[in-house]
Amino acid sequence: KAGVTQTPRYLIKTRGQQVTLSCSPISGHRSVSWYQQTPGQGLQFLFEYFSETQRNKGNFPGRFSGRQFSNSRSEMNVSTLELGDSALYLCASSFYGTSYSYEQYFGPGTRLTVT
Amino acid sequence: AQTVTQSQPEMSVQEAETVTLSCTYDTSENNYYLFWYKQPPSRQMILVIRQEAYKQQNATENRFSVNFQKAAKSFSLKISDSQLGDTAMYFCAFSNSGGGADGLTFGKGTHLIIQP
C-alpha cells in the first residue's frame, strides 16, 4: 500500500497570503489528522476529519481550517499568514473501526516558510 | 487535558548498547493508548511501538520494547543492540479512547544519537 502523501513538500509564502496544503491518506483509511510542528511548541494537534466531518480541533485560531472529501483526501488552509505559521505541517491517517484505529501513520510533511 | 513529559532532551550511546528513553504522562482516563514515534532527519514520523492501557503485557517489536507502568503513568522505550540508523528524535505520544478523534498529544521529544 502506498503511504500517506502530502503536497507540496515545500512552500514559501509572504505574510498576509493564504495557503492550501493537501493530504492523501493510506487507501482505506478514513480518518485524517493534521499537526503543526515547530521548534518552540513541538507537535500540536490541529484538527481531525472523519467521513468529511471535523470531529475535533486543537487550540488554533480560526485562520486554520480544513476539509475532507468523499475519497478521504484532506486539505488544510491557513489564511492571512503570519511569520509564526512557519512550520512543518504533518498529516496522519488511521483506519477507523477496530482497535487499531488509534494508530496514526504520518506523511512526509509540508515545510511552510512565511517571509 | 492530557500531558506527556519526556525529561531527556538528548541522549548519546555507543552502537550495540542498550538505551532507555523515559516518558511520563498525566491523564484521568482509564482506557487509552500510548505510542513511540521516531523522526529521523528526513522528518518522516515512523510508528515504532504501541501499547494499549488495558493490556498488562508490555509491547515488543523486534529490538524495541516498552516498560509500561500504569499506576506510575510511565511508558519508557528500550532499544536493544542499538544501530546507527536508530539516530533520530523519539516522541512519546498519548491517545485517549475516544475513537482517535482527539488527536495525539506528544512529548517534546528525545534526540537519540548512536555513536559508531
Image (cartoon, coloured by chain):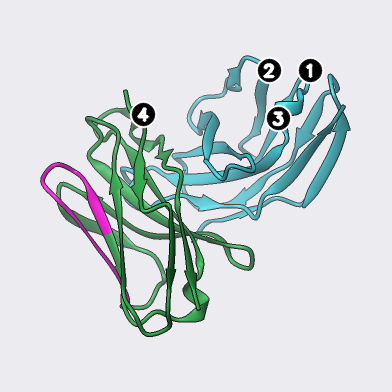
Chain colours: A green, B cyan
Percent position (x, y) of residue B111?
74, 46
Circles 2, 1 touching at the beta carbon (< 8 Å): yes
Q: Amino acid at mark 4?
A: Tyr
Mark nearer the N terminus (2 vs 1): 2
Identified by mark 2, the residue type is Arg
Pick the front one: B99 or A23: A23
Residue drawn 61% across and 45% down? B91
Q: Nearer the viewer, residue B57 or A91?
A: A91
Mark drawn on residue B63: 2
Q: Earlier in the sequence, mark 1 or mark 3?
A: 1
Q: Residue B85 appears in which quarter of the rendering?
A: top right
- Queried whether the magenta region covers residue A53, the answer comes back as no
* Residue identifier under label 4: A100
Residue picked out by circle 3: B86
Residue A32 at x, y = what percent? 30, 47
Label 4 marks a residue whose chain is A
Q: Residue B81's mark?
A: 1
